Image (cartoon, rainbow, N blue to C red):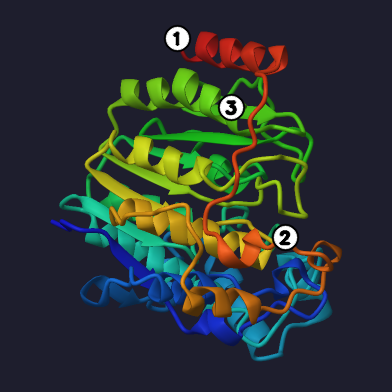
Amino acid sequence: MVQKPYLISSEIYRASRYGAKHPLSIPRVSVAVDLIKAMGWFPQDRFIQGPIATPEQLHRFHDPDYVDALQRAEQGVLTETEKDRWNIGRNGNPIYPEVYRRPATAAGSSILAAQLVCGGGTVHSPAGGTHHGRRDQASGFCYLNDPVLGILTLLDAGIAPVVYVDLDAHHGDGVEIAFQNDPRVTTLSIHEAGRWPRTGPLHHDLGPTVINIPVEPGFQDDEFYYILETAILPIVANIEPEAIVIQCGVDGLADDPMSKLALSNSVYPTAVSALTKLAPRQIILGGGGYNPYAVARAWALIWATLDRQDVADQPLPPEAQDILRELQWRHSLAKNPPSRWFDRLIDPPNNGPIRDSIRDTVRTVLNATG
């Protein structure tokens, strides 16, 4: 049994980039791990280098021909027809030097995380959370679907029911599609309404194991906590899951350029802390996040929460500040960055009234789930 949380990462993320103009050209996982080290929170005896999943492991969910195409894309031998067929090199899914190895490492890490928690415990793999990947196509910057592979590993070990909670600003469509007909897995996604992939409506006919909570632009901390406390936690507690997988995409932050939500980074560790108490096995993944300063700070906070580190709202130590100040981000938001991006870990809260539409959404979700 994993008594204390394990952290899984890999050096492949340090230099790998999707391309100069791509939203994922920024460093994320490596900066979060560096920040964890600078804060004195690095678990030397509980850190694991993420393994590259084997093709056979990937075939548990992904089409073998698609896996082969992804490998050949990395070798530069994919035809234009094949690119169209597999959506590789198309629609925001570029071909870059590690186009197979990088997502296969995230997949291998989620598979390993599931194996580690079979007897109980917690694993954090911030490179995971590629929730848009389809069985036979890349989608939404996601070439493989590591959450699906991790959940399948749990199910294959006889661990059920499993609850998947997706906190990303974008709907977790790939995971929902994979398990929408499997009564052993409940997928719950809270996301910005109308944001790509424009799925995950409040009203659906996919049964009680598919729960979507779309929220409007401007969604802030108090509204998040209201939904967490009145809907998400009671629903998950009622299921009594044997395992919970949490996708912690942080593109819902007010500082993120890829959504119109207005959350502070404190909501994520709060949600993770509450949710992990509801199951004996927990896998915490990353996901979206397109402001490198915001992502690194949020994911470091999540790890600190999991590892029960003392987090004080005070200036960061010089080593941590240096890591953040050395980042390069060519975005309009970075032209006049606030000082807290460099010298504080915790955002100021974004409080506000709970809109009637949010209350109506919660009522609809609770009525649908009984």
Q: Secondary structure at mark 1?
A: loop
Query: In which quarter of the view is residue 358 placed?
Result: top right
Residue topped by disc 3: 222
The first of marks 2 and 1 along the sequence is 2
C-beta proximity under 8 Å, tags 3 and 2:
no
Q: How many marks?
A: 3
Question: Given the image, on which type of amino acid does mark 3 rest?
Answer: Asp
Residue topped by disc 2: 338
Q: Residue at x 40, y 43 (%)?
A: 272
Q: Secondary structure at mark 3?
A: helix
Query: In which quarter of the view is residue 98 placed?
Result: bottom right
User: Where residue 354 appears, x then y in whole percent?
Assistant: 65, 18
The first of marks 1 and 3 along the sequence is 3
Residue topped by disc 1: 370
User: Where residue 173 appears, x then y in whole percent?
Assistant: 62, 43
Q: Residue at x 27, y 37 (%)?
A: 279
Q: Residue at x 39, y 75 (%)?
A: 37
The quarter in which the C terminus is drawn is top left
